[in-house]
């Protein structure tokens, strides 16, 4: 039987945006399974949504899509990816400004686990300026973020920031 190809898509997803969703949808054209892996290490205060809230939200977004798994992880990404039998980590690249950080991470991860590859996908042209950080900032200041996030996230943001 052919081996199932698994890609891990790690990140903070605080909250998930339409840019992330676009990336997952395109990754599913290439890999059999995508594991959306929410990093717990990043959660040392400062997050708007708890890891549990984010997991529940991402599950709602991909409800019915059996090839998407939602999980959280602690510790090194390379160890987590190995435990998931993933050969590939997916990361999105929006702009040149993302490149240095992503290049450092991918290189460090390859030094740690040479068999694990990082695949970069260019963010879709309608999402290249969207980031979770900007979505939170705009929503917090009363701006309309309906075009940038799925409805489930919009509802949550409206609860957190009644002015948005
Ligand atoms: O969406 P983000 O916040 O840019 O994601 C960053 C993330 C979670 C992919 C990165 O910080 C990570 O892999 N954290 C896990 C800990 C780890 O492996 N650190 C070494 C990275 S070289």
Image: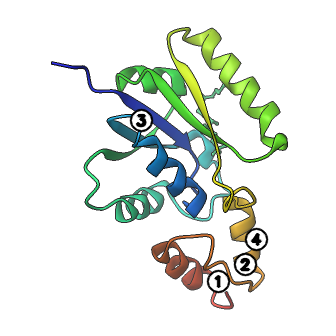
Quarter of the rendering containing residue 42: top right
Q: Name the residue under label 1.
A: 161
Q: Which of marks 3 and 2 is nearer the N terminus?
A: 3
Q: Mark 4 points at which residue?
A: 137
Describe the element under mark 4 as helix, strand or loop: helix
- The colouring scheme, among rainbow, by chain, secondary structure or one colour, is rainbow
Describe the element under mark 3 as helix, strand or loop: loop
Quarter of the rendering containing residue 60: bottom left
Residue at the image position 79 percent from the left and 46 percent from the top: 95
CB of mark 1 within 8 Å of CB of mark 2?
A: yes
How far apart are labels 3 and 2 at the CA level?
Answer: 36 Å
Q: Which of marks 3 and 1 is nearer the N terminus?
A: 3
Q: Earlier in the sequence, mark 4 or mark 1?
A: 4
Q: Residues within 10 Å of mark 2 (few under 14, many from 20)?
A: some
Foreground: 24 or 37? 24
CB of mark 2 within 8 Å of CB of mark 4?
A: yes
How far apart are labels 4 and 3 at the CA level?
Answer: 33 Å
Q: Is residue 102 above or below residue 65?
A: above
Residue at the image position 49 percent from the left and 34 percent from the top: 74
Q: Which of marks 4 and 3 is nearer the N terminus?
A: 3
How far apart are labels 1 and 2 at the CA level?
Answer: 6 Å
Residue 132 horizontal/vertical position (percent):
66, 60
Q: Residues within 10 Å of mark 4 (few under 14, many from 20)?
A: few
How far apart are labels 2 and 4 at the CA level?
Answer: 5 Å
Q: Name the residue under label 2.
A: 140
Q: Does the residue labelled 3 lie within 8 Å of ligand 1?
A: no
Q: How crowded is mark 1: few (under 14 residues within 10 Å), some or many (20 or more)?
A: some
How far apart are labels 4 and 1 at the CA level?
Answer: 10 Å
> Looking at the image, can residue 114 be seen?
yes
The picture quadrant for ligand 1 comes to: top right
Which residue occupies the extreme left position in the image?
1
């Amino acid at each position: 039987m052919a081996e199932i190809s698994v890609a891990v898509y790690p990140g903070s997803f605080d909250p998930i945006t339409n840019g992330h969703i676009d990336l997952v949808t395109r990754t599913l054209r290439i890999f059999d399974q995508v594991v959306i892996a929410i990093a717990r290490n990043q959660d040392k205060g400062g997050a708007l949504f708890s890891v549990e809230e984010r997991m529940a939200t991402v599950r709602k977004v991909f409800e019915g899509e059996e090839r998407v798994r939602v999980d959280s992880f602690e510790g090194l990404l390379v160890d987590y990816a190995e435990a998931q039998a993933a050969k590939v980590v997916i990361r999105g690249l929006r702009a040149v400004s993302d490149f240095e950080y992503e290049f450092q991470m991918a290189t460090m991860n390859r030094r740690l686990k040479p068999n694990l590859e990082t695949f970069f996908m260019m963010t879709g042209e309608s999402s290249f300026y969207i980031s979770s950080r900007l979505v939170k900032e705009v929503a917090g200041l009363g701006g309309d973020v309906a075009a940038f996030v799925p409805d489930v996230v919009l509802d949550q943001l409206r609860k957190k920031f009644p002015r948005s």
